[in-house]
Image (cartoon, helix red, strand yellow):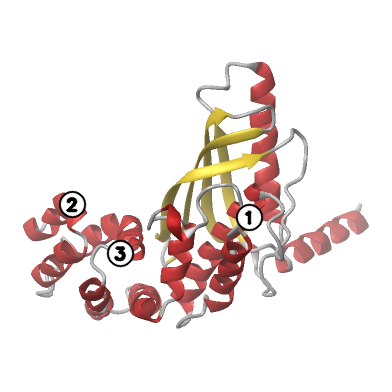
């Protein structure tokens, strides 16, 4: 009995050292299809396959402890069944990272992609081939996994997410001749192509620096000096003004504020350091679509 217990502890230790990068919650819904029992079985099987693919694939060469895994969520909403094994819908992806010395998790990425089209057979594994466009569902999932990892690494080290953004860029390159939507520059300015193009352009380097300065130099130090941290976070937001002046209402800046607008309100509404109105004047210019939320900063209420 003791021997078994020791072996069990060794197993837990091994799992902990070799944990994968993501702790991802996966949901698949299909409001118009789930009344059919056969479709319901496919939905459940797909949810299981996506969960296994995302959480059990080794996405980096780094070693993660269980508590270090990136917290994220994937919601697939199937809206249409094109054929017996082909589906169309949307996918929503979000991720967050912990703030040092607190229980709070700061959201880094939150996006709903309306261009999801894929094939899936019940009880089949999702297979990703990084060198070519083999399976669109695998490519979409891998693309967003690398985007989430890239943003996470950028929040801990200056431009630390570059290797993972490069992997996302490779997937987009592989998919330029794909029949499925969402990959090409000609399909609009708010898709996977432009998401990664903007992330890797020199013009958007201030945004990547903002992720680092806002989280690592600002948020992570709030436990020891709140006022200094808020000033650092405000200065990080100020750096986005250069992008706004060159490219107003750019896709990636909008996504940044989609993830951060509520957090910014909660941080700066009760602020008594004199930054409150400076933050308000800046933020309504950078993200006018959420001005009703930012008015709470002006009023000094959450």
In the image, is 191 to the left or to the right of 70? left
> Which labelled disc corresponds to residue 293?
2
Mark 1 vs 3, N-terminal side:
1
| Residue 268 to residue 228: above or below | above
Give residue 244's quadrant in the image: bottom left
SS type, badge 1:
helix
**Foreground label between 2 and 3:** 3
- C-alpha span from label 2 to label 1: 35 Å
Q: Residue 51's mark?
A: none
Circle 3: is it few (<14), some (14-19), or many (20+) Cα within 10 Å? some
Front residue (pair 142, 151): 142
- 254 vs 106, left or right, is left
Left or right of residue 12, residue 97 in this image: left
Q: Which residue lies under the disc numbered 1? A: 139
Distance from Cα at disc 2 to Cα at disc 3: 20 Å
Crowding around mark 2 (Cα neighbors within 10 Å: few <14, some 14 to 19, many 20+) is some
Nearer to me, 187 or 114? 187
Which residue is at 77% across, 40% downward? Answer: 124
Let me know if residue 56 appears in the view. Answer: yes
**Secondary element at tag 2:** helix
Q: Are marks 2 and 1 in contact (CB under 8 Å)?
A: no
Q: Are marks 2 and 3 in contact (CB under 8 Å)?
A: no
* Apparent side of residue 270 relative to residue 54 in the rendered image (left or right): left
Q: Is residue 97 visible?
A: no
Residue 175 at what x, y percent from top left?
61, 58
Residue at position x 20%, y 74% in the image: 245
Where 170 sits versus 114, above or below? Answer: below
At horizontal 61% and vertical 63% (from top left) the residue drawn is 171
Q: Which mark is residue 250?
A: 3
Where disc 3 sits, the SS reads loop
The one nearer the camera, 214 or 246, is 246
Choose the circle earlier in sequence order: 2 or 3.
3
């Amino acid at each position: 009995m003791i021997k078994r217990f020791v072996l069990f502890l060794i197993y837990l230790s091994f799992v902990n050292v070799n944990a994968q990068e993501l702790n991802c919650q996966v949901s698949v819904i299909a409001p118009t299809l789930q009344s059919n029992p056969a479709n319901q079985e496919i939905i459940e099987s797909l949810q299981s396959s996506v969960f296994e693919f995302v959480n059990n694939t080794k996405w980096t060469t780094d070693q993660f402890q269980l508590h270090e895994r990136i917290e994220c969520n994937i919601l697939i909403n199937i809206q249409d069944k094109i054929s017996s094994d082909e589906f169309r819908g949307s996918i929503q992806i979000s991720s967050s990272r912990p703030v040092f010395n607190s229980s709070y998790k700061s959201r880094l990425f939150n996006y709903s992609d309306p261009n999801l089209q894929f094939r899936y057979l019940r009880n089949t594994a999702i297979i990703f081939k990084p060198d070519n466009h083999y399976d669109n569902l695998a490519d979409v999932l891998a693309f967003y996994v690398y985007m989430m990892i890239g943003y996470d690494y950028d929040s801990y080290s200056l431009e630390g997410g570059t290797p993972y953004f490069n992997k996302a860029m490779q997937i987009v390159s592989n998919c330029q001749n794909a029949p499925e939507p969402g990959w090409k520059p000609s399909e609009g300015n708010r898709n996977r192509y432009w998401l990664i193009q903007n992330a890797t352009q020199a013009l958007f380097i201030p945004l990547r620096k903002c992720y680092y300065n806002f989280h690592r130099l600002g948020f992570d130090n709030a436990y020891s000096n709140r006022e200094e941290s808020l000033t650092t976070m405000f200065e990080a937001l100020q750096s986005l003004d250069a992008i706004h002046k060159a490219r107003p209402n750019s896709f990636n800046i909008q996504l940044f504020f989609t993830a951060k607008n509520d957090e910014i309100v909660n941080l700066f509404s009760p602020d008594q350091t004199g930054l409150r109105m400076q933050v308000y004047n800046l933020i309504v210019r950078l993200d006018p679509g959420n001005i009703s939320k930012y008015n709470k900063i002006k009023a000094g209420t959450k």
